Image: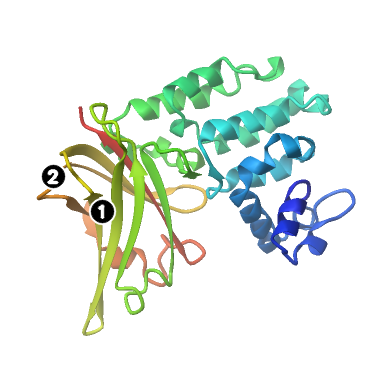
Amino acid sequence: MSFSIHRILYQYSFSLTNIMFHPSKSYATRAYHPPIIRACISSIGHQFETVIGEEWQSEWESADAEQIEHILRHNSLIVSNEFIVWKAVLRWLNSPTHPERREPITVAKLMNNLLPLIRFPFMSGEELAEVEEGEMPETARSLHLPFVNLAYKYQAQPLARRAQAVEFSGCQFLVRLYSDVRWTARIILSRHDLDSRTRPEISSSFMTRASAIQNDGWKWSLKIIGSNYGGDETKRVILVAEEIDQARSVEYLFTICDESKVLRSVAGRKNFTKSRDSTELSLKHKGAELPFHEVIRDASLFVDANELHIQLMLKPIE
């Protein structure tokens, strides 16, 4: 990729720099070289808020639509929240130096490609209201509204309903690596992490907001515990309420996904207490329980590029 990634890769001494650049366009995207594209997007993902910041505004606004699309597809952008991503896209679309982007035919094409990649369902209600009233070009004023309406519908549903609905399985329902503390977490595990012979137990910690009656955030751990007896490997997935001082009554949504869609979800309810501070999570397939060691076996469709992508969403029960 070109523009600001040049500086990022320079900072981190990536040898890709000379390969990537071309006087008119990125070699990676022009030649469609997936490994280089992935390396470039990964670099951008780790510095995304810097890339879209004031210092590199001209580079961001000069990026072509294909580059923006590659970036928005990336689920591992490290960013405070999705509203920041949306504001960056609007700034790119409304760039004074690129009025051609706002021509009726062009803007419709751009938005048809980019809007499905914005994770509107993970914005707050206040942020969605601002999206509705925001600075969309007049030529594209209503194009984003179906996506905003679907986000409102998603947020209004119980987590069990979200787990069952096919309409909630596309790219826009994949969580990024948000740094703001809200109600979601994304965990990525390599195949090495999942090997019981080398790591019999994995624990990934994350924070969420607390219920309305408590001020401090809640700490959680997702533990994957493996065992191998007589060549038969088993895996258990445990959600643990850490440092619990008061009961936490929540709905949970446990999801396995790849880079473009939700693959399988299970929802449940649990009242976590000091004496009962954990619950086992299990997936189902055609009504039957799907053992977790089957989810991560060598030929599994759930392991994407040797990585397992997990999403967790919690919602307090009022």
Nearest to viewer (mark 2 / mark 1): 2
Looking at the image, which residue is at 65% across and 19% down?
136
- Relative to the observer, which residue lies in front, 311 or 157? 311
- The residue carrying pointer 1 sits among few (fewer than 14), some (14 to 19) or many (20 or more) residues within 10 Å by Cα, namely few
Residue drawn at point x = 24 percent, y = 74 percent: 227
Foreground of the two, 135 or 260 = 135
Q: Is residue 298 above or below residue 250?
A: below
Q: Residue placed at 59% from the left, 45% from the top?
A: 73
Q: Is residue 236 visible?
A: yes
Tell me which amino acid carries mark 1: Lys
Q: Position of residue 194 (x, y in %)?
A: 37, 69
> Which residue appears farthest toward the right when viewing the image?
23
Disc 2 secondary structure class: loop
Quarter of the image containing the C terminus? top left
- Left/right placement of residue 66 relative to residue 233 reads right
The alpha-carbon separation of the residues under discs 2 and 1 comes to 26 Å
x and y percent of residue 160 in the render? 26, 38
Q: Residue at x 56, y 47 (%)?
A: 77
Q: Residue type at mark 2: give it.
A: Thr
Q: Which residue is mark 1?
A: 284
The local secondary structure at tag 1 comes to strand
Question: Where is residue 273, by image quadrant?
Answer: top left
Q: As displayed, is residue 90 above or below residue 220?
A: above
Q: Nearer the viewer, residue 251 or 289?
A: 251
Is residue 32 among the parts visible in the rendering?
no
Comes first in the chain, label 2 or label 1 = 2
Decide if residue 260 is on the left or right side of residue 134. Answer: left
Q: Which residue is mark 2?
A: 273
